[in-house]
Image (tube, rainbow, N blue to C red):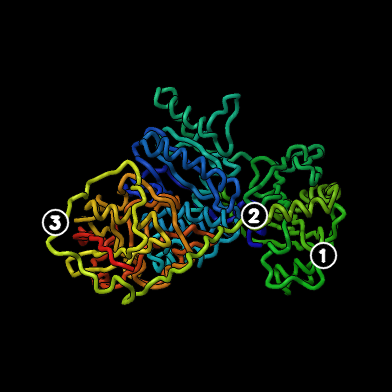
Amino acid sequence: MRKFLAALAALIPLVLIGALVSVAGPVQAEGGYSGIPQSRTEDGFPILGNPSAQVTLVEFSNFSCPGCLSYTENIKQIVDAHVRTDQAQFIFMPMIFGDDPSLVAAQGALCADKQDKFWDMHDALFEIHRNLGAKAFTPELVVETAKTLGADSEDLSACLNSGETRAIVQRSITRANMAGVQYTPTLMYSMDGGNTLQFFARPEGGVYDSGVPVEVVAATLERARAGQLTPAPTVTPTPIPVDPYAYKSFVAWKSVDGLLSYEIPDTWESRLSPQNGPISYVVSPPQSETSGILILALPIAELGLAAVPEEVTGQTLLQAILGDQFASQIRAVEAGGLKGGALRQTFDSTDRVTGAAITIERDLWVLVIDSQNVLILQVINLIQDSDKMLPIKERLAATLTIPDAQTFAGAITTAFLPPTPIPSPTPVTGFTPVKTGEGKCVGVKAPEGVELPDGKSKQFDKAPELNLNSAKIYCAILSTKDGQIVIQLYPEVAPLHVNSFVFLAREGFYNGITWHRVITDFVAQTGDPSGTGSGGPGYEIPLEVNPVVRYDQEGVLGMARTNDPNSAGSQFFITYAALPNLDASSISAGYTIFGQVVEGMDVTRKITPRDPSGAVSGEGDTLISVVIVEVDK
């Protein structure tokens, strides 16, 4: 319910922002952004890519916006083709439409940016949207998600609770208003580091005022390299008074799907508003921040009520939404043949352009379509414009037409169907995972007098052919300055991972490398010859998860990967505690488990903490060697 109650354009105090100048030194991105510098503007907006790039790409986006979720695939292509190659830098600006769940997501992502984890968090939050829906974000889920990415959850929780990143969100909304942004996602570009933003030109004329095709971005950047683009003139916006009520007549409007129609002033427009819901429209005059009507269809189950009233009417639902204290103020209304309840309220706000104090009137209607679905009308205007808004509201309500309520209700149900859950793999029969102190690898010693190969810098064109002996148990002995760690491997549940690990160990790939990421109470990670968290063997392994093994104890051997589930290489980690967030779930594909420490957890705990992002710096301890020993089953 929080989403649509304040959806008509974030009526919150804002501060004008200055130029988008990078002030943080670049750090190396982790995960899917490996090797790409990260930094941030002086106003706190995350930057991906070389700050000296000729072109700056700026995306205004919303973590709860369905169109933004779809556009992430375009962004990935743009990043790989143009940002990774230093042709452009990319700046993300969060857009929030009221106090909706994506505000929590945006603030959490910006808090993660303080730990140099914005971009991985960015992808993880969109995955939550993809798997759990646009309204799934809660502070607890955001913090837990950051924790799975290796962020300090206590620091991030404190940042989120303090609201310190809210100001960055507010500055983004102001910048969007100054640039003329109306929709999310909107991609723009700049030739002066982000000081002035320009819309991409359409080949047929006009501009893209939302997402931009990948090929148009490529063509524009090519023109920039050829010296055919110049910065737009810097213009200080001057508020131009526009009378939103200077209309002469009403015109008919009908949705493309034919589900509903109504009449609006001839100077106003009605447009889709996907950030508010799959069936959502905004009716508003041009250049007005304080007048408009939101129309939103949704299931009653989406209202977030603790309990649905026994008698489902517009009045009872509105009372359940807002509380019993408003019961006496709720009035009966009717529109489009639907009966409902309405409540008029006022609240103080600030004009986002002039900074002047204003009082907003909101008239909220809840119209019942059937026992499962409702149509919401939210009318917003300045208190002094109530008389002017009244005929517009009455005309829309009087002309609202729903040709087939049953078809309309069916469309709502279809639009809000839950996402398809991630299928669970079939458990392996006859296999039982071991615990510390258990298993055939307990007591196993590395053979003496064997020369350790040096394969630290080797690279391979493809993963090795499967070459495991089903009659053997594979034990890995990891040597450190403080002793040995003995691991029993799990070829039964992750044959490709075990096969690769055994191959790399016997090639000497792991000998002499660094424990590059060691975080107390989380994991000790190694397997990267570069020691930065971005290296690998030259090939990737597909995900292998199975419910027979879980991150339910310390000493679990897991495989690191990027945000792409099928991107594991050579980097592996040992857990310091139970980490259920790493298991496969409705919001994550999970991380492959391919073994368990059976001896040497005390040695594992002595590995010196280190974080390649800079939180805990230093050389890091050395993984002296990895030796594979086979024993009979």
Q: Check the image and name the residue furthest to the right.
A: 337
Q: Residue at x 35, y 48 (%)?
A: 465
Amino acid type, label 2: Ala
Along the line of sight, which residue is nearer the eye, 203 or 150? 150
Instruction: For marks 1 and 2, give the CA distance.
Output: 22 Å
In the rendered view, would you say 322 is above or below 82?
below
Amino acid type, label 3: Glu
Identify the residue position indicated by label 2 in the image: 7
Q: Residue at x 76, y 67 (%)?
A: 317
Identify the residue position indicated by label 3 in the image: 451
Amino acid type, label 1: Arg
In the rendered view, would you say 12 is above or below 152?
above
Instruction: For marks 2 and 3, give the CA distance.
Output: 67 Å
Of labels 1 and 3, the one closer to you:
3
SS type, badge 1: strand
Coordinates of residue 450 in the picture (x, y in percent): 14, 59
Q: Answer yes or no: do the residues labelled 1 and 3 have beta carbons within 8 Å?
A: no
Observer able to see residue 614: no
Coordinates of residue 384 in the picture (x, y in percent): 72, 53
Along the line of sight, which residue is nearer the eye, 566 or 15? 566
Along the line of sight, which residue is nearer the eye, 92 or 349? 92
Q: Which mark is residue 331?
A: 1
Instruction: For marks 1 and 3, give the CA distance.
Output: 86 Å
Q: How many marks?
A: 3
Quadrant placement of the N terminus:
bottom right
